[in-house]
Image (cartoon, grey):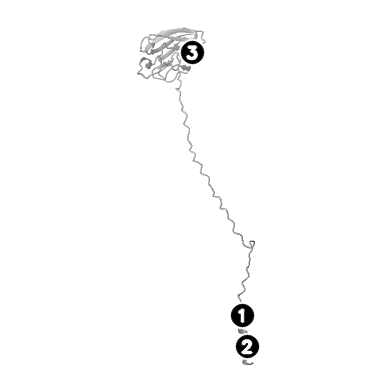
Amino acid sequence: MNKCYKASLLLFSGALSLAGCDEQPEPAAKVEVSNAATPSATPAIAAPAPIVKPAPAAAQVSVASPAPVVVELPKPYEATLEEGIDFSKPGYPTFIAEAKGLSVYESPIRWSDANVNPTVIFVFKKELPKNFTLQIIATAFGPNIDAPVKVRVGNVEKTFTITNKEPNSYKLSFKTDGKSNKIEITPPKPTSPHDLDPNNPGVRKKGIAFETIKIKV
């Protein structure tokens, strides 16, 4: 091959090379990814609601009920009608069913108290004898001295008068139909210490203080 021919080839190949160098590289194809292909955002997961523990119930304090007040009544004692009622003892003899109008036990006596009942009443478990003598050892308070005391058995009423502050014995004879089981004694002028002296706080309306009551046939 002659020199001229070689030079032509070299020139031609150079031209080709230069022409190739002028061309820009073809841009890479864009790949469009559809939304369907794009993984969706991770859905927000709601935080679990906090577990609320119920507040502990208030401790229940057990309050004990107060113990009932038990009032022990004095025991009755054995006695006959002639032995009678002895007020130096806290109770009553077994032949008494009920007593009204009397104050608290104050050995050796027991006062009548009009605040409780204006008349002192003794109810016996059996009817009283038709004929008997009522013997009362008693004293009195204030204006009840030298005033008539009424005593009733059935439909029979009698009186006696307490003459001084010292206990004395008083006797009353009764003749009844034998159907009554009660003796009623009415103090004449029940009076409280406060009635006599405003500075005295005592309000118990006293009349007669009994020591004994006996029934003698």
Tell me if I can see residue 7 in this picture: yes
**Element at label 3:** strand
Which residue is under mark 3? 182
Q: On the rendered structure, is 196 left or right of 185?
A: left
**Foreground residue, 12 or 180?**
12
Q: How many labels does the image show?
A: 3
Q: On the rendered structure, is 22 left or right of 204?
A: right
Amino acid at circle 2: Ser
Q: Is residue 153 above or below residue 74?
A: above
In the image, what residue occupies the spot 46% across and 7% down? 157
Give the position of the N terminus as an image quadrant: bottom right
In the image, what residue occupies the spot 63% across and 87% down? 9
For the residues marked 3 and 2, what is the alpha-carbon distance in whole angstroms? Answer: 172 Å
**Foreground residue, 163 or 190?**
190
Which residue is under mark 2? 8
Amino acid at circle 3: Lys
For the residues marked 1 and 2, what is the alpha-carbon distance in whole angstroms? Answer: 16 Å
Q: Are marks 1 and 3 in contact (CB under 8 Å)?
A: no
Which mark sits nearer the N-terminus, 1 or 3?
1
Which mark sits nearer the N-terminus, 1 or 2?
2
* Disc on res. 131: none
Which mark sits nearer the N-terminus, 3 or 2?
2
Tell which tag, 3 or 2, sits nearer the viewer. Answer: 2
**Element at label 2:** helix
Which residue is under mark 1? 19
